[in-house]
Image (tube, rainbow, N blue to C red):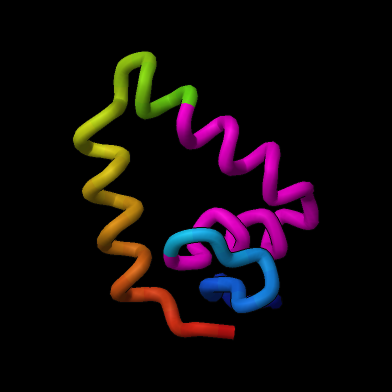
């Protein structure tokens, strides 16, 4: 089983979206666009809190 981690290659801010994309074997741009759309539509603050928590909890690659 592969472990979830922050990406060093697909890093823009903290590497969380890049790590999620690598874990699920998808394009990092799709994960980033989905994250931004979810933040803008309805899940803004809670999703940002989860992102920041993952940035500090997940190990780097």
Note whether 6 is above or below 21 in the view shown: below
Q: Residue furthest front?
A: 12
Q: Is residue 51 left or right of residue 6?
A: left
Q: Residue at x 66, y 65 (%)?
A: 10
Q: Quadrant of the C terminus?
A: bottom right
Q: Is residue 16 magenta?
A: yes
Q: Is residue 37 left or right of residue 18?
A: left
Q: Residue furthest top?
A: 41
Provide the residue span drawn in magenta.
14-36
Residue 4 appears at what percent x and percent y?
A: 56, 71
Q: Main secondary structure of the magenta part?
A: helix
Q: Is residue 29 magenta?
A: yes
Q: Is residue 38 left or right of residue 57?
A: right
Residue 3 appears at what percent x and percent y?
A: 60, 77
Q: Residue at x 68, y 63 (%)?
A: 23
Q: Residue at x 52, y 66 (%)?
A: 15
Q: Quadrant of the N terminus?
A: bottom right
Note whether 41 is above or below 49 in the view shown: above
Residue 27 appears at what percent x and percent y?
A: 77, 48
Residue 49 appears at what percent x and percent y?
A: 22, 48
Q: Residue at x 31, y 17 (%)?
A: 42
């Amino acid at each position: 089983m592969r472990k979830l981690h922050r990406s060093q290659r697909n890093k823009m801010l903290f590497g969380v979206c890049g790590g999620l994309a690598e874990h699920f074997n998808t394009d990092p741009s799709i994960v980033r666009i989905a994250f931004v759309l979810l933040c803008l539509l309805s899940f803004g603050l809670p999703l940002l809190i989860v992102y920041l928590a993952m940035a500090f909890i997940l190990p780097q690659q």
